[in-house]
Amino acid sequence: MVGAALDIFSKGGFAFLSRWAHVVVGITWIGLLYYFNFVQVPAFAEMEGAARNNAIDKLASRALWWFRWAAVATVVTGLLILGFQDEFTKSSYFKSPGGIAIASGILLALTMFVNVWGIIWRNQKIVIANARNVQAGGEADPAAAAAGRKALLASRMNTIFSLPMLVFMIGASHFETFFNNGLRGFNLDGAHRGLYWGIMIVVWIVFELNALGKIGGTAPGGTNVIYDTHKNAIITGACYAVFVLLVFSLVLAA
Ligand code: HEM
């Protein structure tokens, strides 16, 4: 009845439902990412060992469950929007302003997803196992601190990526109005798109390699200064968001 009234059982209806679900689970994922970065990490740094181990066991492990499965749900619902959306089936979609924006957003979001499952969760499992073992009276795992550090770098990197990623998620539907309200068209030939992707990919690779410790190692300072505090990560992410908007505008908008 409601389905029929809203015409929900149609391709457009499913695209709408996927979009709605995508934003709900996306909020859950990124909301928890911000909770870890802005609330939990600074709070844990001030807590005593025993209290921290208990919080890792009871609180962080639960938050991480929602975090990593919300990441899966975000990718799945994002792909569903693409599948149900008519634009996607046009061969020229990824050469259009909306298609280029969403492809750029998906590149960053998929990197964040790989960081969640491949680095953050893999290392947090070591941290959680250590906290539980110590609580039960066992020996501390000497590898736990290094594992926590690797997870922290990837988590702060994801905070940085989240800001430009959301510029693109929103830009996919709104860049055209945004730029055309200034009565500007787009330069979307191969040369302009090539230049755009060249810049985006180099910056993305440099950031990710840095988060993996391949450029400045894993110690604080140097190129890792962007991860040293959550404030530094927010500033870097905001600059990255402005940067991608400028590249889109200067390279692709006429
Ligand atoms: C690999 C992962 C992801 C994929 C495949 C994906 C895919 C998509 C697609 C296809 C759209 C519709 C674009 C359009 O309007 O044409 C979209 C929009 C959006 N996405 Fe994602 N996305 C991903 C990750 C994320 C994440 C992590 C967030 C975080 C909150 C997010 C938030 C949004 C938002 C807010 C919109 C705008 C909805 C709208 O304007 O209607 N997405 N995404």
Image (cartoon, rainbow, N blue to C red):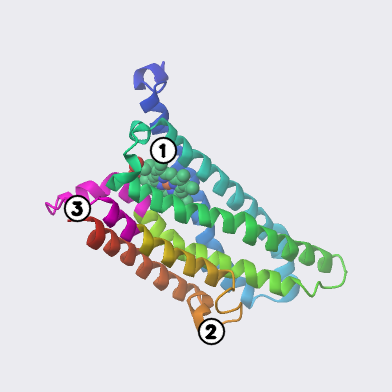
Residue range in magenta is 168-196
Sequence-first tag of 3 and 2: 3
Which numbered dot is residue 179?
A: 3
Residue identifier under label 2: 221
Q: Which secondary structure lies at badge 2? A: loop
- Confirm or reject: label 1 Cβ below 8 Å from ligand 1: yes
Question: Which type of secondary structure does the marked residue at label 1 adopt?
Answer: helix
Position of 131 compared to 32: left or right? right
Characterize the local packing of mark 2: few (<14), some (14-19) or many (20 or more) Cα atoms within 10 angstroms. Answer: few
Q: In the image, is residue 23 above or below residue 248? A: above
Residue tagged by mark 1?
Answer: 19
Q: Looking at the image, is 165 positioned above or below residue 237? A: above
Q: Is residue 124 left or right of residue 166?
A: right
> Viewer-proximal residue, 206 or 20?
206
Residue pictured at 28% horizontal, 48% vertical: 97
Q: Secondary structure at mark 3?
A: helix
Mark 2 or 1: in front is: 2
Q: Quadrant of residue 95?
A: top left
Q: What is the crowding at mark 3: few (fewer than 14 residues within 10 Å), some, or many (at least 20)?
A: some
Q: Is residue 33 left or right of residue 218?
A: left
Rendering quarter of residue 251: bottom left
Of mark 1 and mark 3, the one earlier in the sequence is 1
Q: Amino acid at mark 1?
A: Arg
Q: Earlier in the sequence, mark 2 or mark 1?
A: 1
State yes or no: residue 14 in magenta.
Answer: no
Image quadrant for the C terminus? bottom left
